[in-house]
Image (cartoon, rainbow, N blue to C red):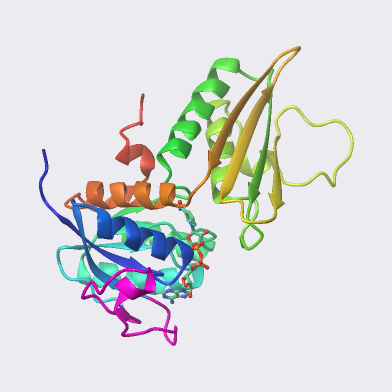
Amino acid sequence: MDNRLTSVVIVGARGRMGQSLMSEVLVSDSMTLAGAVARPGAPGLRDDVGHMIGRRSVGITLSDELVPGRNDVVVDFSLPEATEGYLARCVERRVPLVLGTTGLTEQTQVKLIEASREIPIVAAANFSVGVTVMIHVAGATAKALGDDWDAEMFEIHHRNKRDAPSGTALRVGQAVAEATGRKLSQTIRTSRDQVGPRSRDEIGIMALRGGDVVGEHTLMFLGESERIELTHRANDRAIFSRGALRAARWVDGKEAGLYDMFDVLDLHGV
Ligand code: NAD
């Protein structure tokens, strides 16, 4: 049993995920909160972050600068525009990073790969353990079913979500494409603009937005006279926080490299 305490710095601390992450860390007996970072000019800078999430003082104040200690793990759920700066900071300080921010530009993705040659990074479009297992099952199912089955997906998220389709839908689609020898970029269709029969090798994704839906993904495999549906419903964003913090504990002390939740859950090759 590993009794070490993992020391965590949360970036994007005033956001929905940031607050959920801090709440989870503060009730955990295997982690400590070492810092909380918000954007420059954010309200509440230098206030005790305990008050921000309806608790008593915890002795950590909100900062607009990321200055991790050498034993800290940085957990970033902020905005894609901010990611490159934080990546550079983690490389400079030689600390591991758990990156949950989605919608990264291609340029930022290149920087991410470069940074992972220097420090260990776990990046995932969805840190939920349930979704990770769904991605695994989607790939295995697609492989077993073969080319005769069509794959279609829909996803629903709250009205404020910025990117569409969701990073999770793309990741599920990628798992199906890889398992059946298709190339994702050629196969994803994200709207119903094109009328007429579907081509055999496409994977359709419909993105719906509204209300406060935390996240729902349904993947359908449609065959002749039968259908398989895989659905994951997220009821609370704490599922992402718990998965991300599990990743933070896992990545603490790992070698440099780019890891994902398959590594954290040891699902590669299963
Ligand atoms: P949010 O808009 O509630 O929070 C984002 C926060 O980041 C805001 O408080 C914003 O002020 C802050 N921010 C902006 N620039 C910053 C900077 N330079 N430094 C520090 N903070 C900065 O959004 P959210 O719902 O908390 O989601 C945050 C990110 O996490 C999004 O990219 C979202 O898509 C992603 N997300 C990922 C997962 C996953 O499992 N990978 C799950 C949920 C959300």
Residue plotted at (25% across, 74% down): 57
In the image, 212 versus 153, the foreground residue is 212
Does the magenta-highlighted stretch encompass residue 47? yes
In the image, 41 versus 198, the foreground residue is 41
Residue 97: x percent and y percent? 30, 59
Residue 100: x percent and y percent? 42, 57
**Location of residue 269 with respect to 173 vertically, above or below:** above
Instruction: Look at the magenta stretch and give its main secondary structure.
Output: loop
Query: Which residue is at the far top?
Result: 225
Residue plotted at (62% across, 59% down): 163
Can residue 117 be seen in the rendering of this structure? no
Quadrant assignment, res 111: bottom left
Residue 51: x percent and y percent? 34, 74
Does the magenta-highlighted stretch encompass residue 269? no
Residue 101: x percent and y percent? 46, 60
Q: In which quarter of the image is the C terminus?
A: top left
In the image, 195 versus 16, the foreground residue is 16
**Location of residue 219 with respect to 245 vertically, above or below:** above
Q: In which quarter of the image is the N terminus?
A: top left
Is residue 136 found left or right of 222 in the rendered image? left
Residue plotted at (35% across, 31% down): 267
The range drawn in magenta is 38-65
